Image (cartoon, rainbow, N blue to C red):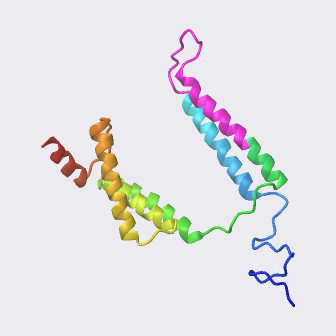
Amino acid sequence: MSTETPHGGEAGASRSPYPHKTARDLGGLAIAVALFLFAALIAWDGATYPARRSYAQFGPEIFPYLVAAGLAIFGVATVLMALRNSFPEREPMNLPAVAWVIGAVLAETVLLYAGAGFILASGALFGFAARGMGRKPVWLTVLVGIGVSAVLYVLFKHGLSLSLPAGPLERVIDGAIRG
């Protein structure tokens, strides 16, 4: 009598579906480098803030430095975990899903620069990213994204008086609200 598991291996056998891990986790080291670069960028940007000191000897300009320090600490922890190879095993990269998400960001950027406005650009971002995460059909996710983006546009533009990129849909909504 065989004791096979549903995955085709012997019971008790420890077979991983993932490739053999190297001595160092190169993906973890890449994440650590990105954390350090992001921390440096935030600290550099924080250095451009005007100093508004009060009786406390520091003001709001300290927060970018606190965020940068936190990211640097996470970077150090990530390096240590990568060198010890103590990250949990990850699934192999799903390239089609990554392509959909990258396409979502590119679509939003192109649509914003083309003058389509916040609603259509954000709707495309939402729909394509949702497709990358497994949601189908794309046309429905884009429509849902446009609906959510329209509500957010009204809240941000007319509720909070924030300026968002305007396109044809935004102009129609603004005209309807102004009456």
For residue 148: magenta? Answer: no
Quadrant of res 3: bottom right
Check the image and report above or below for 101 versus 14: above
In depth, the one of 115 and 126 nearer the eye is 126
Residue visible at 12% across and 43% down in the picture: 179
**Residue found farthest to the front:** 1
Quadrant of res 162: top left
**Residue found farthest to the top:** 55
- The segment highlighted magenta reads 47-75
In depth, the one of 56 and 75 nearer the eye is 56
Residue 12 appears left or right of 117 = right
The quadrant the N terminus occupies is bottom right
**Residue 91, percent across and down?**
68, 67
Count of numbered tags: 0
The reply to whether residue 111 is in sight is no
Residue visible at 55% across and 65% down in the picture: 98
Residue 161 appears left or right of 85 = left
Residue visible at 24% across and 54% down in the picture: 169
Residue 154 appears left or right of 44 = left
Residue 75 appears left or right of 51 = right
**Residue found farthest to the left:** 179
The reply to whether residue 53 is in sight is yes
**Residue 8, percent across and down?**
77, 84
**Residue 44, percent across and down?**
59, 32
